[in-house]
Image (cartoon, rainbow, N blue to C red):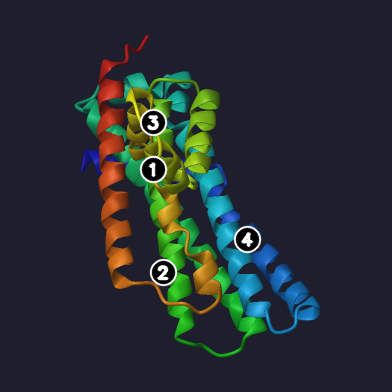
């Protein structure tokens, strides 16, 4: 119950910060883009809207995850409310878990609403529903899994560094994670302890490249069930490990 209480408080705080307004901004942008694409594109309206829409969902989601996630702990310390919370029968791991659940719920609602906005834009340029729309929803689900991982990373870095550094670290890992497979291939092509160290670093890095299916979905390609299962297990496992690290870092941190 303590975790859920902190999660609800985090969600309400995000709402007060107008984080939930991002889907409205997204809807306006997608409506304008759909109208523009319908006027200037011939035969590729659907592909353009899907690529643009999925990129926008990712962009808005990552920005929210990093900006809010990196300030979760810092705000509580600055407002001195953290000491009040921890003075009650609340363990530090419960505080970290509650903050994560609250932010993850916020991101899920944001992502879900933006996914519906994307489908609405698709209906404008391509009236009627088709089986390929299901793969668009799966692509949105993959984005939500990525946001779950980014949320965990942002929370981890916020437990031992300033919001600015936490934001830089989180964004850098997100960018590098989109090239994780390429970096892994380059690292494995060499020999010696330096290359082995590089290979280990690439496996510690989140592999966001496995979640990037926008190009295939835009062309109506299906997504293998095995990939959906693999990405789901990978995202949950990686996020769980990051949260464990966040709990340890927060337990070791001296609060003054």
- x, y percent for residue 226: 28, 67
Dot label at residue 138: 2
- x, y percent for residue 140: 46, 64
Between tags 4 and 2, which lies in front?
A: 2
Q: Which residue occupies the foreground of this view, 141 or 98?
A: 141
**Which residue does the numbered mark 3 point to in the structure image?**
198
Between tags 3 and 1, which lies in front?
A: 3
- x, y percent for residue 72: 43, 32
Q: Quadrant of residue 187?
A: top left
Is residue 10 visible in the rendered structure shown here? no
Q: Which residue occupies the foreground of this view, 50 or 247?
A: 50
- Give the residue at x 62% y 78%: 46
Separation of disc 3 and disc 1 at Cα? 14 Å
Separation of disc 2 and disc 1 at Cα? 20 Å
Between tags 1 and 4, which lies in front?
A: 1
Separation of disc 1 and disc 4 at Cα? 26 Å
Task: Please determine whether, in this image, residue 168 is positioned above or below residue 13.
Answer: above
Q: Is residue 37 left or right of residue 115?
A: right
Mark 1 and mark 4 in contact? Answer it, CB < 8 Å: no
Crowd around label 4: few <14 · some 14–19 · many ≥20 (10 Å): many
- x, y percent for residue 180: 44, 44
Crowd around label 1: few <14 · some 14–19 · many ≥20 (10 Å): many
Q: Quadrant of residue 30?
A: bottom right
**Which residue does the numbered mark 1 point to in the structure image?**
206
**Which residue does the numbered mark 4 point to in the structure image?**
26
Q: Is residue 52 left or right of residue 131?
A: right
Closer to the chain start, of discs 2 and 1, is 2
Task: Identify the element where label 2 is drawn.
Answer: helix
């Amino acid at each position: 119950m303590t975790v859920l209480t902190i999660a609800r408080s985090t969600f309400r705080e995000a709402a007060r910060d107008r984080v939930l307004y991002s889907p409205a901004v997204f809807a306006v942008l997608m409506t304008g883009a759909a109208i523009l694409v319908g006027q200037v594109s011939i035969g590729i309206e659907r592909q353009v809207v899907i690529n643009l829409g999925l990129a926008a969902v990712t962009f808005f989601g990552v920005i929210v995850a990093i900006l809010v996630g990196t300030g979760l702990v810092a705000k509580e310390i600055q407002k001195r409310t953290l000491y009040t919370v921890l003075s009650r029968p609340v363990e530090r791991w419960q505080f970290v878990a509650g903050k994560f659940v609250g932010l993850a719920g916020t991101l899920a609602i944001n992502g879900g609403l933006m996914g519906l906005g994307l489908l609405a834009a698709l209906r404008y340029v391509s009236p009627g529903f088709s089986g390929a729309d299901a793969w668009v929803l799966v692509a949105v689900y993959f984005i939500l899994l990525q946001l779950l991982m980014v949320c965990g990373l942002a929370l981890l870095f916020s437990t031992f560094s300033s919001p600015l550094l936490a934001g830089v670290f989180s964004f850098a890992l997100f960018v590098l994670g989109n090239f994780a497979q390429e970096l892994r291939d380059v690292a494995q092509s060499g020999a010696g302890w330096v290359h082995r160290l590089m290979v280990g670093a690439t496996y510690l890095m989140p592999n966001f490249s496995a979640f990037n299916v926008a190009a295939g979905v835009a062309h109506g390609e299906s997504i293998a069930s095995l990939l959906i299962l693999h990405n789901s297990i990978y995202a949950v496992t990686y996020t769980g490990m990051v949260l464990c690290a966040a709990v340890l870092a927060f337990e070791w941190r001296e609060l003054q």
